[in-house]
Amino acid sequence: MTGEPPTGGLDALPSPLDSVADSRAAARWIISSAGAVGALLLGAGPLIAAGKVDDWAHATWAGGGLLVALLGVAWAIWRTSEVLVPPMTTPASFAGPELRGLRERLQAEPWYHFGGYAEDVDGLLRHRRIAAAITARLPTAPPEERAALREGLDVARRNIVRTDPYLRWLLTTAHAWQVRETLRQARRQTFLASALVVVGAVVFIAATAG
């Protein structure tokens, strides 16, 4: 996957943002399906069946079963809708548990993903920190130090230009990875929610069958 790949053949790979669009399309499909199930549960058929119940015990069971089924639908929609919310992706995101798999891949081939400039994301950020420190130091530095500081700032900025493409590529990849992991978790939650819907529907049908 690559967003704005720098070198090393990365430009031949598809953009990770393509997978983001696919993940969100899958999430919309899940939400639409869950909404259709909810509409079916609230349709005329279940309401007519509930209206035929003539004792409180069966009515309680029917209402409870319908409520459980609707809670399952709401759970699936709520969890899946998180895929549609763009995650905030920064260098700090690489420390999150959802990016563990990506970290393992980066650590396995650092020479490829970091272009030989660093061993990790923190190493790519080193030149930015140096530039920021020099910039903060310059206004109060003695005149005899300023020439050396400006020279160091120029070097840091040149290194930033070299490493920035790798950093942007990694952030884009991390963004897509976060969306993928959110969808994966949503699928698990939807499976559990579907079981809840089935249990609620069975209870409702059993309560209204008589």
Image: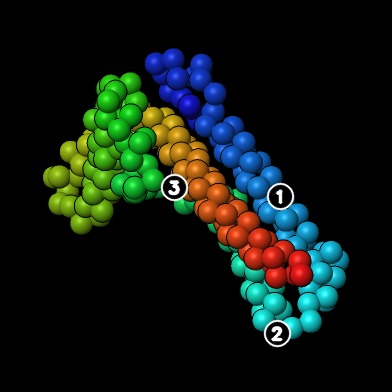
Residue 187 versus residue 146: which sits nearer the camera? 187
40 displayed left or right of 5: right
Q: Could you tell me if residue 89 is visible in this image?
A: yes
Residue 121 versus residue 200: which sits nearer the camera? 200
Give the residue drawn at x 72%, y 64%: 205
- The answer to whether residue 133 is above or below residue 147 is below
Dot 1 amino acid type: Ser
Q: Position of residue 158 (x, y in %)?
A: 32, 30
Q: Nearer the viewer, mark 2 or mark 1?
A: 2
Q: Which residue is mark 3?
A: 89
Image quadrant for the C terminus? Answer: bottom right
Q: Secondary structure at mark 1?
A: helix
Q: Nearer the viewer, mark 2 or mark 3?
A: 2
Dot 3 amino acid type: Thr
* First of labels 2, 3 by sequence position: 2
Q: CA distance from mark 1 to mark 3?
A: 29 Å
102 displayed left or right of 15: left
